[in-house]
Amino acid sequence: MSQKFIQVEGPIFLAVQKSRIFTDSKLFVDSIPQRTPEEITQSFEQSKDLEGFVRDNFFLPTESADINVSASTPLEYIEVMWEALQKDMIAETESDTLISLPHPHIVPGGRFRESYYWDSYFEAVGLHVQDKQDIIDQLIENFCSLIETYGFIPNGNRVYYLTRSQSPFFSHLIELTSNEAYLPYLQKEYDFWMTKGDRLVENGLNRFYDSKDTPREESYYEDFSLILKEHAPLYRHIRAVCESGWDFSSRWLKDEKDLLSAHTCDLNPIDLNALLYHMECTLEHGTQAEARKELMNTLCWDEETGFYFDYNYQTQRRTSTWSLAALYPLFVGMATQNQADRVAQHIEEKFLKNGGLVTTLTKSGQQWDAPNGWAPLQWIAFKGLQNYGHDTLATECAQRFLETCSYHFEKSGTFLEKYNMESPEELPQDGEYALQTGFGWTNGVYAALTAELSEQNSSSL
C-alpha cells in the first residue's frame, strides 16, 4: 500500500489508533487528508496535540452515521431508505481510501459508508421484488469494475480491504438479471477463489483467507490490544473471519469462547464451498461442481447426526459447531432430499426461536452466535427450505423474523443490523462495534420475505 494513505499506515496511523482518540477505529481510516501526505507528516512531527492535529489535517466522517427518516410503515421506510443509502462512490482525492466505482452503490448504513460484497446481494433481493432493476444493474456493474481492476471483488471498496474478499454471492447477484455479458467477470472471480495455496487447499475444497497477517487497519486497536505481538500468526485467522462476513463466531474458534483460539484458515467452511458450487454450476463447470459436491458429502456431511459441519483439513475432522451455514447446501440445491429433510428437522428443533433463527447454538458473547440472528441467514433458510418442499417451516421462520423486525420498527422507527432471536423484544448481543441501524440487508430481506409471503397468501385464496 502506498504511503499516500497515511491514515492507513505509518506513524500517524499508529499514533491515532493506539491512542484511542476515537472510539471507532474505522473512523480515521475513512478520513481524507486535507493536504499532501508529505506536508501532513511534517506537521505531525512538530505537533503536541494529537487529536487537534488530526482534526486540523483530516476531513473526518460524521462520527454518528445514523440516518433518520420518517415513515409510518416498514415498507414505506425501506422505500425511503434505498434513496438515503444510495451513495456516490467517487474518491475525493488520491489519498482518499475509497475506491471509486462507476455508479452509486447501496451502502449498509451506520459506520459502513462503502459498498460491501455480500451485503449487496441481500440488498438486491429486496430491490428485485420492488422492480428496481436499474439499481441492481449498477451494483453488478460496480463489481465488474472491481473485478476488471483487481481480479476479484474486495470485502468493500476501500484500499484497506484489498487483501480479502467476502462470501462470494456474485453468481447469485447476476441471477437477478438476464445479461450473460457478466459471465466472463464471474469466471475471473472464480479464478481468484481457485488460486492454489491461498483459498484453495490440497483436499480440493476452499477456505477463507487474507494475504496479510497484521492487525486489520479498520480495527487496529481491537486486534492489537487483543492479540499483541506474541500472537502475530493469529492476525491472518482474524482477517479471514472478516472475509467470511461472520465476524465473529464460535465457528472459527478452537475454544468457542476464546477469540485467541481462532483457526479460520484451517477450515473448509460449508457456506463458502456451497457458494462456489453454485458458481461452478452457473459457469457450467460440471466436473468441478460434482467433485465439490462429493467432497462436501464426504468431509462436511455427518451422517450420524444428519447435519453439515465445517471441516478442519489440518486435523482431518469436522468441527462441532452447529450453525446456519448448514442451510447453504439447501440454498444452492446440492443436498439430497434426505439430507435436506434431516437438516430441516434440526432447524425446527434447535434453531427456531420466538424471533426467528439463531445463527449458532453457542452463546460465546460474539455477535454471530446465539442469541443473535441476521437477515441474510433468514433468507438463506427460507429459500433453502423451500427448495426441498419444507414450505410450512420456511414460512414460520420468515414470519417470526418479520414480526421481530416490525416490533423494533414500531419502537425505534428503524431497522437493525441484527436481532435477538431468543428474546425478540430485547436488543441483540453487540460485537466489537456498537449496534448499527439502517440497515441495507435487513431492508432487502424484509422486503423480499414480505413479497414472498404475500404471494403465498394470494395463491392460497
Image (cartoon, grey):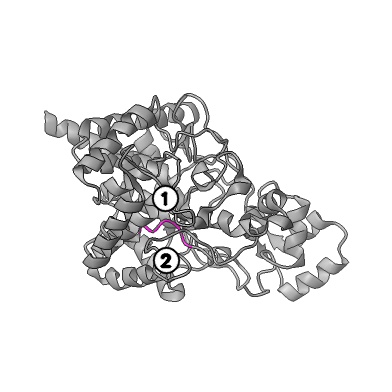
Q: Find the magenta span and give its range.
A: 165-169
Tell me, yes or no, if residue 284 can be seen here: no
Q: Position of residue 72 (x, y in %)?
A: 40, 31
In the image, is residue 167 part of the stretch drawn in magenta? yes
Q: At x 29% / y 51%, what residue is drawn?
A: 297
Q: Residue at x 53, y 51 (%)?
A: 112
Residue 241, placed above or below residue 306 = below
- Image height of 290 relative to 305, above or below: below
Q: Position of residue 67 (x, y in %)?
A: 52, 43
Callout 1–callout 2 Cβ contact below 8 Å: no
Q: Is residue 163 left or right of residue 20?
A: left
Q: Which residue is mark 2?
A: 202
The mark nearer the N terminus, 1 or 2, is: 1
Circle 1 is placed at which residue position? 83
Q: Which mark is residue 106?
A: none
* Left or right: 338 as drawn, with respect to 120: left
> In the image, is residue 287 above or below residue 86?
below
